[in-house]
Amino acid sequence: MLNERLKVAMTSGGWTYGALAEKAGVDAKSVERWVNQNRSPRLKTAVLAAEVLGEDLFALWPGLRQPRAARAVSPELVALYEQRADVPVSAFVDLLGRATERIDVLVYAAVFLHEAYPRLNRLLSERAADGCTVRLALGDSDSERVRQRGAEERFGHGIESRCMIALMHYRPLLGTPGIEIRTHGTTLYNSLYRADDQILVNAHVWGVNAFGALVWHLRRAGTNGLFDTYTSSFDAVWSAARPVEEN
């Protein structure tokens, strides 16, 4: 998985792997892995490399941005991210990969997951094979509410296309025991990524794309709390969603 931003910064500045490695105090192979495998260096090393390149540290390696420590607002709040772009894809992948009983995903498209982690379908299949129930609720590209969201986010017809692309990504999972895919046309106030007793909630803000809106990480602590509020919301949307049929 290529780190395009880093590659462009190095190319535009005429930096080779060896030259940047010397400045950052690492070997050239490490720099090559930063670029071609999207590996993140240690924070101290990343600061040096970013200064040398004249780039913003977190623009080069978003995964190094630490989530804001949760205040004692709720015992269920694990972490708060100011925007989804600050959440490393590995946080989503690790959360889903640890599930043993249930995975629920409620989105319009969220194509960033497949784009950043092409093994997502395999991961979901493996979880289902181990007995995990997987429910995927995607936006109906023909829904008026989906089109309205596109207009609000200034994406125009792009969001309908992303919904179709998302379904294309997940379609190979149809017929897999333990996995069900449905489409919904609800007004989506939050995108939800649940794995057992943990959930990542991506808020939706009028006029802002989902990647620019905050995310909170919740872990169930008792009943009738924030976690249960969101899982009940998922269940309500799921019950009204339309199953996707195999071709």
Image (cartoon, rainbow, N blue to C red):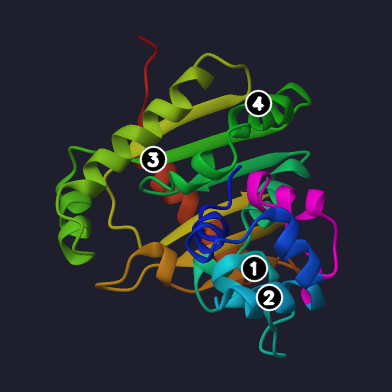
* 219 in relation to 114, above or below: below
The CA distance from mark 2 to mark 1 is 5 Å
Instruction: State the residue position of label 2.
Output: 79
At label 1, which amino acid type do we have? His
Single out the mark in the foreground, 4 or 2. Answer: 4
Tag 2: residue type? Ala
Magenta range is 25-43
Task: Name the residue located 61 percent from the left edge and 34 percent from the top edge.
Answer: 120
* C-alpha distance separating marks 4 and 1: 24 Å
The percent position of residue 211, horizontal first and vertical second, equals 43, 64
- Is residue 186 in view from this perspective? yes
Q: Which residue is farthest right?
A: 26
Task: State the SS at label 4.
Answer: helix
Residue at the disc numbered 4: 122
Q: Residues within 10 Å of mark 1 (few under 14, many from 20)?
A: many
User: What residue lies at 29% left-to-right and 51% top-to-bottom?
Assistant: 186
Mark 4 or mark 2: name the one nearer the start of the chain.
Answer: 2
Q: Name the image quarter holding the C terminus.
A: top left
Quarter of image, res 240: top left
Task: Write down the quadrant of residue 116 in the picture.
Answer: top right
Q: Which residue is mark 1?
A: 217
Query: Is residue 58 found left or right of 31 in the rendered image?
Result: left
Disc 2 and disc 1 in contact, CB within 8 angstroms: yes
Q: Is residue 40 above or below residue 203?
A: above
